[in-house]
Amino acid sequence: MKKTSLLLTIFCSAVVFAQHSDYSIQAVDFTKVKLTDNFWLPRIEINRTVTIPASFERCESTGRVKNFVMAGERKGKFCTHYPFDDTDIYKTIEGASFSLAVHPDAKLEKYLDSLIKIIGKAQEPDGYLYTARTIDPVNVGPWLGKERWEKEREMSHELYNAGHLYEAAAAHYLATKKRNLLNIALKNADLVCSVFGPDKKHVAPGHEIVEMGLVKLYRITGKKEYLTTAKFFIEERGHYNGYDKNSHDPWKNGAYWQDDKPVVEQDEAEGHAVRAGYLYSAIADVAALTGDDSLLHTIDKIWQNVVEKKMYVQGSVGSNGDGERFGNNYELPNATAYNETCAAIANVFWNERMFLLHGDSKYIDVLEKTLYNGLISGIGLDGKSFFYTNAMQIKNSFTHGDMEAQRSGWFDCSCCPTNLVRLIPSVPGYIYAQKDENIFINLFISCAAELNIHNNPVQILQQNNYPWDGHLVFTINPQRSEAFNIMIRIPGWAQNKAIPSTLYQFENPSNQQVNIKVNGQVIDYKIQNGYALINKTWKKNDVVEVDLPMEIRRVVANENLKDDIGKVALQRGPIIYCAEGIDNNTSTDNFIIPNNAIFTSEYKADMLNGITILKSDVPKVLIDNNQNISTVKQPFMAIPYYAWANRGKGEMMVWFPERVNAIDIISR
Ligand code: FUB
Ligand code: ZN
């Protein structure tokens, strides 16, 4: 047998025996779910036609591609800002691969091949791939040590770059079946596994993601070392003696890197929010693949802490701009909210994994909250303007501390735009999941999905106008009639729960019920882990209809959340609202939204690509030139939070005073 075919045989047999255990619930792959809706499909199309090309164009024009070219030639000078700029190319390739998987495009595929060739040349013979060093290893920038991985624990991001390479390679291989990028990634992963381990070099990666990436390579190849190295990196955290662990300064005590305690002793979300979200996601993966309960308990505790004490009402996390990190418990200021878009993306990754571990809808409630609000607020409706931070309030000065009041096309540190490139096309993969004969319907997006139960192909069609309308229609089409369970998520917000914790609640309970019909007949259903469980022998063209109450809800915060005391936020369905100056006579200040305010909702097809707006007449405090104060009823209008800042600069507000004593009175 020739050496190459021997290798191929080993590789193929490894694939067959790769997964003894994994998540007991499996997400239905995005390639099996064809969207037909008006909310996500246009976003995915814009991602394909605008965001991906713009992102590659920016990778070229900013010098990110040139860095790889120079590394291939082993000469030149690293020409962008950060050593992790390589990852923008990897993330864009990942997003482009997701797109190719459902939308073949020979030109794009060829372009990816040309980039992969450049990446391959930048790889050193032993597999090391990191342009910031390879271009000129003698003259490296301040974030790099003289030796490979010397500053990995701090800021070099060598393993972070590797992690994004693995994620891109996995996506590219699965989409195209080509091994060109995968081989580069495997060569690098083999080097990483040969360098780091219990009897080798020890490090807790400075910016997590290599762990998730290794898991993806493990799933593809079955090579156990990738999984054990991912677990090793997770378990390395908290064992470094170089920090002052008693210091309250998170930069000095290791908390910024989630490295102050072993992960199994951590019970509070801490440090850099993107790093943390990727760590918790990786812990979930490794717990699922190894059955390690101590890891599972850790993320259960940390999840509870985040949802109970550290999440904004629109699903964003990472409130503190000093270190882009989680604040203390209940530290969720509106004026300086940081809320990096990447942290929202990490939160979606993590909550999906928590659901796959536990099968409870509360994780999808959080995922949906983040996805429909604090995550897509990060990208403009044009597909090529972005927020890095996601503000909760813009006052009349039009500044927001150091944060943004206006979207930008690109940033020196452009992690968020390229992270969105890969997140958006993967959304169809969050809709369905399956465990044996249980089909979970998690998100409500019109689509046609092809599932399979006991070798019986089952098609499910969804028709709805979500998130604007709560009428959901599901048509179940098994090839052969068969008994199985359809589990439809009944969102927490449709059951009087603003969030699965006490952090936020609806001010006024609703007594509207969620009605379900099967083939036109109202049914009694049982709720199991947040899902309406419908068990029957399904036959072709069975129709399930669900009516979710789409009342306008007033959200109030836990009394410990001092920044929101006396204030109210507005929610309809999964959508959190904000007011913008442009719809409110330029100013969102001084409005009062009293408990008895009567709101109406109206769908506006021609506004911001189609949104439902909320309207009311509410008191506004006015101050005249003589400083006399009066309260006058004025029209008030709110739009979905995600859609703000698409019509130029202006004020924005999410939390509104309920009474005059909760107003920060602004005089003009
Ligand atoms: O460090 C790499 C990326 O840059 C982080 O994930 C972002 O928060 C930004 O700091
Ligand atoms: Zn980012």
Image: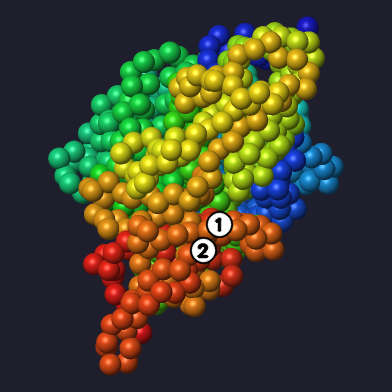
* Rendering coords of residue 141 (x, y %): 44, 55
* Residue nearer the viewer, 36 or 611: 611
- The structure residue drawn at horizontal position 82% and vertical position 39%, both measured from the top left corner, is 104
Find disc 2 in the rendering and name its residue: 615
Looking at the rendered image, the quarter that the N terminus falls into is top right
| 523 over 571 or under it: above or below | above
* Residue nearer the viewer, 133 or 270: 270
Whether residue 412 is visible: no
Question: Cβ(mark 1) to ligand 2 < 8 Å?
Answer: no
* Rendering coords of residue 409 (x, y %): 60, 63
- From this viewpoint, which residue is outermost toward the right? 106
| 590 over 628 or under it: above or below | above
**In this rendering, position of residue 530 left or right of residue 631:** right
- The structure residue drawn at horizontal position 42% and vertical position 22%, both measured from the top left corner, is 231
* Residue nearer the viewer, 153 or 393: 393
- From this viewpoint, which residue is outermost toward the left? 246
Query: Mark 1 packing: few (<14 Cα in 10 Å), some, or many (20+)?
Result: some
- Amino acid residing under circle 2: Lys
- The structure residue drawn at horizontal position 63% and vertical position 39%, both measured from the top left corner, is 471
**On residue 173, which mark appears?**
none
Find disc 1 in the rendering and name its residue: 601
Question: Cβ(mark 2) to ligand 2 < 8 Å?
Answer: no
In primary-sequence order, the first of circles 2 and 1 is 1
* Rendering coords of residue 222 (x, y %): 59, 15
- The structure residue drawn at horizontal position 22% and vertical position 42%, both measured from the top left corner, is 253
- Tell me, yes or no, whether the two marked residues, 2 and 1, touch with CB atoms within 8 Å: yes
For label 1, the SS is strand
Looking at the rendered image, the quarter that the C terminus falls into is bottom left
Query: Mark 2 packing: few (<14 Cα in 10 Å), some, or many (20+)?
Result: some
* Rendering coords of residue 258 (x, y %): 32, 37
